[in-house]
Image: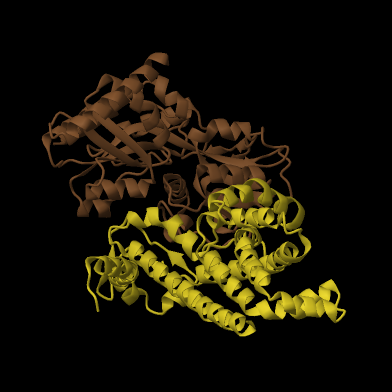
Amino acid sequence: MNLSPFRMTLLGLSLLIPAALCAVVLFLLIYSGQAIGFNGLHFVTDINWNLGDLYDDPVTVKGIQVPSGANYGILVFIVGTLLSSFIAIIIAVPLSVGAAIFLAEAVPPRIRPVLSMLVELVAVVPSVVFGLWGIAVLIPFIGHYIAPTGNGYGLLAASIVLALMITPIIATTLLDALMQVPKENRESAFALGATHFEVVSKAMMPMVRTTLVGGIVLALGRALGETMAVLMVSGGGINILPTSLFSPISTIASFIVAQLDSAESDPTNMAVRSLAEIALVLFIITLAVNAGAKILSSGALHVRKRQH
Amino acid sequence: MKISAKLRRSGVAALAVAAVIGTAGIAHAATTLVETGSSLLYPLFNIWVPDFSAANPGIQLTTTSTGSGAGIAQAAKGLVQIGASDAYVSDSLEKKNPTLLSIPLAISSQAINYNLPGLNDKNIKLSGPVLAAIYMGKITMWNDPKIKAMNPGVDLPDHVIIPVHRLDGSGDTFIFTQYLSASTPAWAKTLKYGTAVSWPAITGEIGAKGNTGMLSAAAANPYSVAYIGVSYANQVAKDGLGVAMLKNKAGKFVLPDADTVGAAANSVVTDTPPDERISMIFADGDNAYPIANYEYAVVNSQQPDATTAGAIRTFLSWAITSGNSMQYLSKVHFLPLPDAIKILSQTQIAKIQ
């Protein structure tokens, strides 16, 4: 192997990113080590989160100093994260499939780039803007017209805001794939007398199905980790599992942000360590989702190659 | 105004020059102080900075709003010189960091606001035990007999109460839960107090982010009740929310204003210990408003060098003298420290070295 300075520099730079990833994981593991020992499996099955009395003397449990009454259970936040993301996907998929098909099939080629750019632009709107929109428009709307209690904050609001944020991700992925469907397939379907609807649903969609799944999983990754917009509209449920679309929820990411400041005044540091452990759980969930995306989208590439 | 703007501009220019000189390696740059913490104190610091900088061009004060917890934690770690906090340093943290001082800068208070269509100008009466029961999910309806008993002649609606609480760590949660703990044994036994507590599960509750989030949640949801720092009194009035009269220790119902908050402050003056770590919540006195508190600067008494220590002393002394004039404080609805407290604060400030 030629070890020229150029190659060495490139090698160093390319190793930097995996090294940073490893450093983050290592940090989370080491930092939350004590919390993992204290919380045990209880951590992911308990619904009660209590920082304990930070103003009293700490007590010693299992040889570890913790604030008295401290109990760290995150099942509520895991459920909140998964539920809000899945509902967001359920809302976003029909929207983005419709948008992508419209852009690929029903729009004159001249204005297609303009419209597709607009869809992509939605993806770069900062999440706090979605949150503000949620507070100013969506929550009063849900509270006034939909929610039986008159309270608009909660699972539904969080899911709708998330759905809007991930729709462009799915739509643009799908649009790219639809544009790559060979002309021959499309035209031969028309030649056989298929209607436009049949061409799309029978000749084109089956070819892009795997890409669609890959796009959905990517969007899911984004939704799972979204913090600020969710924090603003979710109602911040704690110690309570959602029972309806209007229940207050918290997601893992938004809960970490919400609790960090109070956790910092914990003299035993156990609260911050437990937050690091939650981050680890979130990391594992998103890692699993992204690994899924990688596998599915490589499958999509495989399908596309076969068509050529 | 114009003059202060000019001064500020010249201050920026001086800073730029100082930065250039600093990089050139000559030690004549202004001493930099960094303040972080309480979002309730942050607006006051921002009002202070231009005038303080004008009077003390050698000291550059940078302010940031993070949260009381971060203010205390970063001051303890020495990352910032001044941590702003709505709560004093706890006993357990004080044991870990015995050199941390909690120095009161001003007096703040908190209103209990509600959104009851038709009743927002009526100042309905609430008490600590009733609020505790609402936030514990034991009182769920506005026309509950306990609320009715306190408000004879008021037509309370037959509607579910929507309790709103802070989702992020907050000094407002700290003083609110202190009020509930002080007035309600059942709350004190289970939930206690803190900048974040383990809120009991209530189906219709809302967790909101920041005082602005509390405000918009209360405004958007009729039949809600929320605790909001008094700095936001103007916005609360603009949104047409109601301000509740609260039952104090003497059993009287009082509204938060200069008289009642001042009465709370005066009642704890003689009890304030030299380290000034004392709660003003649920204070004695017929006219004392039950949710008032000192706003603290948390400072490490052992600074790395004499220049920094001197700059901190200069700023804190300015804050409790010139900075305590109503010209600054009235903008955020704070009250000045009583004279006896200023003397205690001055003694603490002298310890910084």
Residue at x 25% of width, y 35% of height: B33
**Left or right position of B45 against B18:** right
Q: Quadrant of residue B53?
A: top left
From what the image shows, is residue B214 above or below residue B265? below
The residue lying at 80 percent from left, 79 percent from top is: A189
Q: Work out whether residue A57 or residue A188 is closer to the camera in this orientation and state it.
A: A188
**Where on the picture, by quarter, is residue B83?**
top left
Query: In terms of depth relative to the viewer, which is nearer, A112 or A66?
Result: A112
Q: Quadrant of the C terminus of chain A?
A: bottom right
Q: Residue furthest bottom?
A: A306
Q: Where is residue B211 shown, x and y percent of the image?
A: 51, 43
Q: Is residue B284 visible?
A: no
In the rendered view, tell whether residue A170 sits above or below residue A111.
below
Q: Residue furthest top?
A: B3
Residue A198 versus residue B230: which sits nearer the camera? Answer: A198
Question: Chain A, which colour?
Answer: yellow
Q: Is residue B91 left or right of residue A103?
A: left
Residue B207 visible in this rendered orientation of the protein: yes
Q: Position of residue B196 (x, y in %)?
A: 43, 54
Of residues A197 and B256, the one drawn nearer to the viewer in this rendering:
A197
Q: Is residue B291 left or right of residue A79?
A: left
- Which percent across, then down, holds residue A286? 48, 72
Tell me: B158 left or right of B35: right
Q: Number of callouts in the render?
A: 0
Q: Residue B69, position in %: x, y?
A: 35, 49
The chain in brown: B
Q: Quadrant of the N terminus of chain A?
A: bottom left
What's the colour scheme? Answer: by chain
Identify the residue at horizontal 41%, vertical 80% (top origin).
A41
